[in-house]
Image: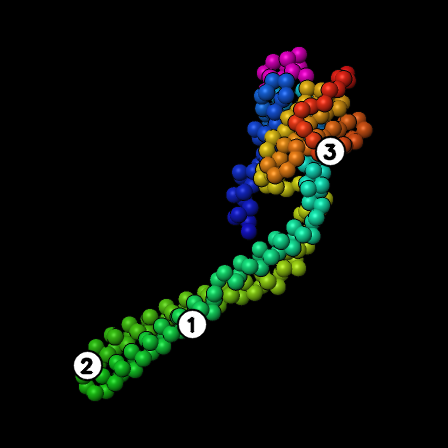
Amino acid sequence: MMSHQSAAEFHNRYPYSGKIVCEEHNTSFHRQVLTSAKGSKEVWQCRVYRNRGRAACSAPQLRTDELNEVMAQIFTELVHDKQTIIDALVAVIQSVPQEHDFARDMERLESEAEQINAKKDRLLDLSMAGAITISEFKTRNDGFNEQLTALESKLEVIRQEQQKTAATTDNLEAIKTALRHELDFTDGVNSELVTTILDHIIVKKVSTREEVHLDIHLKVNGPYEAVFARSKSSFCISRLKSTTPPIRSRRT
Ligand SMILES: [Zn+2]
């Protein structure tokens, strides 16, 4: 589990990279880490603002934690039929062990072992009849025993795999709980989910430092419009009917 996670995390460290667009300049927002006495925070800034300053671009910088909150709200809306999604995912998990027929693999190995044992019996018969020398018997008998040992260790691997699969099935309840928790977004939003589902975010021209207007385009659904007033920490997220922006007066 850990090795998968670290690989995925490496690719998804910055799920907003290249996905935030300044409407005014049609340029992407770049990541910046601001450090202060309070600690560091990750923000995103229009490239024009970054190169030429506030006079050149009025789009506010966006904090990653704000974006995460917006995404969590959108996901919550997307996943309103949470139980259906969980059931579908659990069905997928349950179908995996059935794809592998452990019993058939074990039967095949056991029949190979039987054949080797039959050969050993014949070898012993030959030896007792004086048809082969003792040393010839020993060499060939040792060879058969090595093959049997190899088969036994293969069988052991399969037995262990089978037990693991059984454990996974036993853990289904735990998996369901984990999925329910993941889809609650109470611990924030999973960056892999953002990477998978988010196509791009447009930072609207009407945005100010106090009130941010975003059009959020998902790969699966949407687009959504998010408006949040920073002073009131209020969020408003709605499904956009059309991508044409409504006319608004600019607040200063
Ligand atoms: Zn800009």
For label 3, the crowd category at 10 Å Cα-Cα, with few meaning under 14, some 14 to 19 and many 20 or more, is some
Indicate yes or no: mark 2 CB to ligand 1 under 8 Å.
no
Is 114 positioned to the left or the right of 223 in the image?
A: left
How far apart marks 1 and 2 lie (CA) works out to: 33 Å
- The residue at 69%/52% (across/down) is 83
Residue 65 location, quadrant? top right
* SS assignment at label 2: loop
Q: Which mark is residue 107?
A: 1
Nearer to the camera, 159 or 237: 237
Looking at marks 1 and 2 on the same chain, the residue that comes earlier in the sequence is marked by 1
- Residue 51 is one of the magenta-drawn residues: yes
The image shows residue 179 at horizontal and vertical percentages of: 66, 51
How far apart marks 2 and 3 lie (CA) works out to: 88 Å
The image shows residue 153 at horizontal and vertical percentages of: 41, 68
State the scheme by which the image is colored.
Answer: rainbow
Residue kind at label 3, given as amino acid type: Ser
What residue is disc 3 on?
238
Instruction: Point out the stretch of residues depicted in magenta.
Output: 47-58
Q: Is residue 227 visible?
A: yes
* SS assignment at label 3: strand
Looking at marks 2 and 3 on the same chain, the residue that comes earlier in the sequence is marked by 2
- The residue at 76%/23% (across/down) is 210
Q: Farthest residue to the right: give it.
A: 232
- Residue 15 is one of the magenta-drawn residues: no
2 or 3: mark nearer the eye: 3
3 or 1: mark nearer the eye: 3
Q: Is residue 33 visible?
A: no
Looking at marks 3 and 1 on the same chain, the residue that comes earlier in the sequence is marked by 1
In this rendering, the answer to whether 7 lies above or below 88 is above
How far apart marks 3 and 1 lie (CA) works out to: 58 Å
Q: Which mark is residue 132?
A: 2
For label 1, the crowd category at 10 Å Cα-Cα, with few meaning under 14, some 14 to 19 and many 20 or more, is few
